[in-house]
Image (cartoon, helix red, strand yellow):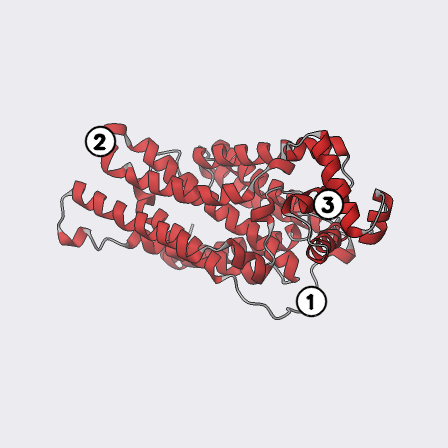
């Protein structure tokens, strides 16, 4: 429409779109932070799943149709976000002020290395493999959403958090052998690994923000800014300047990336530190079902009584399940023990604690029977 000002308008439009999208991501994160961990997990995976579907149907649009969708989709998203915020109870809405806290820098460094590694191969990935709105994203998010929806109590976040390193390393190990196996295998492994790490870091940041009472934007702003490392990885061609053969260069990149990812995972990631500094215990507990305040207090009391009365590790497990109100049969099934063994453990617990019934146990723990 205005050819003489095309460059200036393109720059201004790009900046405006970037700022608008960034603000929307932060506002969406604020609304999500008011939900339970299970709902956050389902909403994040469901949103990325839906995004890949919408992109699939909008990719072929051109001209006025494409322009209309570029206007309507952001407006629709903003209206949905506003409606969601209005349905959040006033007591659960984000609070003003930021308490003192320390940044989970290990998570940021780990995610940054994955972003850089992904950026090194982003331009060589096959069609369908990518970080956002691609077939690889659709497959990954469909699996995460379905598993969390149908098996939330058995969902192991700790195991899931350890899988990206395997996928990323295997993806880069296949790069030198792409002439034999093709590029699809390595591309999908690398893309899924990065998408999974990005998703899990985002989810853990929500968990940390909820436990510390910190506004989620304090974490998400830095996480989103780390996309610059992906661009830096794509712009890095130091090995290419050495004039190495393509096969040698691919092998060298594989070794460098594998060492970096493995070192980052081993040296920078510590579940105990995440639990002690920021209260992230979900990696060890596994399930996505968030405990209530009463359940948190009961768990603390169980640990206190276990130390005071010197319960064995097995007796502490039984006491924990008893405090959760589970029946003897359920406890036997979860711990894979016989009825006689369960009764023996229960009798020893009662004797050490000086009680005679579960009712007295609940009174001692301060729980409702």
- Residue contact at pointers 3 and 1, CB within 8 angstroms: no
Q: Where is the C terminus found, in terms of image quarters?
A: top right
Identify residue for label 2. 179
Q: Nearer the viewer, mark 2 or mark 3?
A: 3
Identify residue for label 1. 96
Answer whether residue 132 is visible to the viewer in this image: yes
Where residue 158 appears, as percent x and y from the top left, is 53, 45
Answer left or right for 6 relative to 205.
left
Choose between 315 and 141: the one closer to the eye.
315
Q: Is residue 96 above or below residue 166?
A: below
Q: Nearer the viewer, mark 3 or mark 1?
A: 3
Q: Whole-Å distance between the Cαs marked 3 and 1? A: 40 Å
Q: Which residue is drawn at 39% across and 58% down?
A: 5
Identify residue for label 3. 319
Choose between 56 and 326: the one closer to the eye.
326
Q: Whole-Å distance between the Cαs marked 2 and 1? A: 56 Å
Q: Is mark 2 on a helix, strand or loop?
A: helix
Q: Which residue is drawn at 74% across and 30% down?
A: 329
């Amino acid at each position: 429409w205005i050819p003489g000002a095309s460059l200036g308008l393109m720059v201004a439009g790009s900046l405006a779109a970037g700022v608008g999208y960034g603000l929307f991501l932060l506002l969406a994160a604020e609304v999500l932070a008011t939900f339970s961990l299970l709902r956050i997990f389902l909403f994040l995976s469901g949103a990325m799943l839906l995004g890949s579907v919408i992109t699939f149907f909008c990719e072929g649009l051109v001209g006025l149709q494409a322009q209309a969708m570029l206007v309507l989709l952001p407006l629709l998203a903003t209206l949905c976000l506003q409606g969601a915020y209005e349905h959040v109870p006033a007591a659960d809405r984000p609070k003003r002020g930021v308490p003192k806290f320390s940044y989970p820098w290990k998570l940021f460094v780990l995610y940054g290395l994955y972003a850089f590694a992904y950026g090194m191969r982003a331009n060589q990935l096959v069609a369908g493999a990518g970080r956002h709105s691609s077939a690889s994203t659709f497959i990954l998010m469909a699996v995460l959403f379905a598993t969390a929806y149908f098996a939330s109590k058995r969902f192991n976040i700790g195991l899931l958090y350890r899988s990206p390193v395997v996928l990323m390393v295997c993806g880069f190990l296949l790069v030198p052998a792409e002439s034999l196996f093709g590029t699809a295998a390595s591309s999908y492994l690398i893309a899924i690994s990065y998408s999974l790490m990005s998703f899990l870091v985002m989810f853990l940041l929500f968990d940390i923000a909820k436990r510390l009472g910190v506004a989620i934007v304090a974490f998400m702003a830095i996480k989103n800014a780390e996309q610059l490392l992906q661009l830096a990885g794509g712009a890095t061609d130091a090995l290419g300047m050495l004039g190495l053969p393509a096969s040698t260069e691919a092998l060298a990149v594989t070794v460098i990336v594998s060492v970096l990812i493995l070192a980052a995972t081993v040296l920078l990631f510590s579940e105990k530190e995440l639990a002690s500094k920021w209260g992230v215990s979900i990696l060890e507990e596994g399930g996505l079902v968030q405990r209530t305040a009463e359940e948190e207090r009961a768990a603390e009391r169980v640990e206190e009584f276990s130390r005071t009365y010197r319960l064995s590790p097995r007796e502490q497990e039984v006491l924990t399940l008893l405090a959760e109100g589970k029946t003897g049969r359920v406890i036997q099934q979860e711990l894979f023990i016989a009825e006689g063994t369960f009764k023996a453990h229960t009798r020893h617990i009662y004797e050490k604690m000086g009680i005679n019934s579960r009712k007295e146990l609940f009174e001692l723990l301060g729980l409702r029977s």
